[in-house]
Image: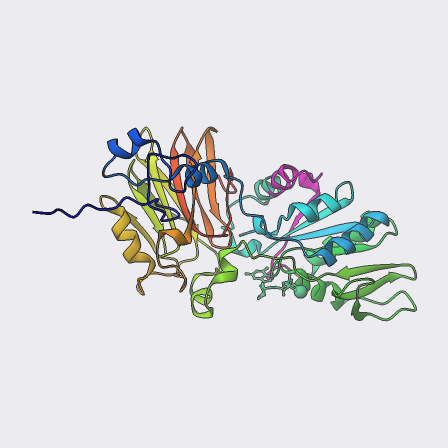
Amino acid sequence: MSKLNVVRRCYSCGTILQGDDPSQPGYLDKNFLESSQNNVLFCDKCWNEQRYNIAPRKAAADPDFITMMKDAQASDAMIVYVVDLFSFESSFIDEINETIHGLKILVIGNKRDLLPPKVPDEELRVYVAHRFRVAALNVQKEDVFLMSTLSSQSDIEEIATEIKRRRQGHDVYIIGAVGAGKSRFLASFLRDFQNPSNHPIQWANYPATKLRVMQIPLDNSSMIYDTPGTSVENSLASKLTNEDSLAVLPREKVNPRGLLLAPKESLFIGGVVRIDLLEAKKVNALKAYFAPGVTLKKAHGNVENIFLKTIVSKFVKPTLPNLKGLPDFDVFDLDVEETGSRDIGIQGLGWINFIGDGQKFRIYLPKGISCYTSRAKIK
Ligand SMILES: Nc1nc2c(ncn2[C@@H]2O[C@H](COP(=O)(O)OP(=O)(O)OP(=O)(O)O)[C@@H](O)[C@H]2O)c(=O)[nH]1
Ligand SMILES: [Mg+2]
């Protein structure tokens, strides 16, 4: 009787795998193809791209924004970089960071209220300064100020005073990702503002660009510019439906959820992210920092099938309507080389914390969404 054989296809791009011609699509070493009948396989092309492209997906910079930052550079302006403490890596756009290299930077870590109050502010400031330095920007912990909508007006005034003291008569550009809290900060700043100049506060196009920028005179020859938020297209938050954003974006303090993950087990974050613990010396105790509305689910055994069912499920949050199968995901392998408390973060959603101990993780993310690994934000 004739027999039906499953055609083996690349897990990532779906091309039919073949072991004969390396110059043709779907090539994979023949021995490998024959010896691993039940495993997931990647063609050489996808495997190499995914294995070596561990760098997070970078959001693009608007050329007009670069033009504006070149101006800032030319006039030796001061940069006030507002970041959302819960999720700020998406605001790091290399192209923009390069243009502000060497300028004086003051960082406002906003949304402090979303992180547990018992975490010392000092620890957060050290972490934020570290992440800026990783992005090659000269920021020390003394340059980082924490804030939240719950902050008192006097906290805001302290930051405003610090900006005035440090800018030494130069212009100030308030920059940061969409939704980081720039306008909130300025609204508080403006509450007690008395215009010391002959120029009005105004919304205007920034010279030689199409950017609408609020300009607040600080004296007759310098301004504060409230700039438009930089792109967060690599952040999951920007892809969610309104209903899911309401459910899964944190609006109040996020308490960590503890869970145990054994080698060969997987963690699903809603129907959008899957983290496999491929190898580990022991069961790992994880702490997951996601808004309470985010569904966390463990799986083992036939993880492939369970995940495919989960991504189209209406019972987990969040999901994305365009995620139908594994070709819609990017896959990253992470070999943990560092020891100590570490994070794996999903841009715009949250992060998991674990103790580095030589683990191998495989991370599945919707295409184009960025993830990162860093020392622990909260130890
Ligand atoms: N939990 C919390 N939410 C905040 C805080 N500050 C701002 N938000 C929320 O974050 C959102 C964006 O705040 P904005 O001040 O408009 O952010 P922005 O940086 O000016 O955003 P763009 O102008 O779009 O670039 C708002 O919905 C605020 O409610 C905060 O300290 N804590
Ligand atoms: Mg704004």
Residue drawn at x 58%, y 40% is 127
Q: Is residue 150 magenta?
A: yes
**Residue 43 quadrant:** top left
* Front residue of this view, candidates 379 and 301: 301
* Front residue of this view, candidates 202 and 158: 202
Residue 96 location, x and y as percent?
70, 49
Whether residue 251 can be seen here: no
Horizontal side, residue 182 vs residue 351: left or right: right
Q: How many marks?
A: 0
Whether residue 170 can be seen here: yes
Residue drawn at x 66%, y 40% is 141
Q: By what rule are the colours in the image chosen?
A: rainbow
Residue 329 location, x and y as percent?
41, 51
Residue 299 location, x and y as percent?
27, 47
Image: 179 above or below 4: below
**Residue 312 quadrant:** bottom left
Residue 26 location, x and y as percent?
38, 41
* Front residue of this view, candidates 256 and 306: 306
Q: Quadrant of ligand 2?
A: bottom right
Residue drawn at x 75%, y 50% is 79
* Front residue of this view, candidates 157 and 279: 279
Q: Which residue in the rendered view is the most extreme toward the left?
A: 1
Magenta-drawn segment = 128-151
Horizontal side, residue 22 vs residue 201: left or right: left
Q: Is residue 68 magenta?
A: no
Horizontal side, residue 204 vs residue 287: left or right: right
Residue drawn at x 23%, y 39% is 38
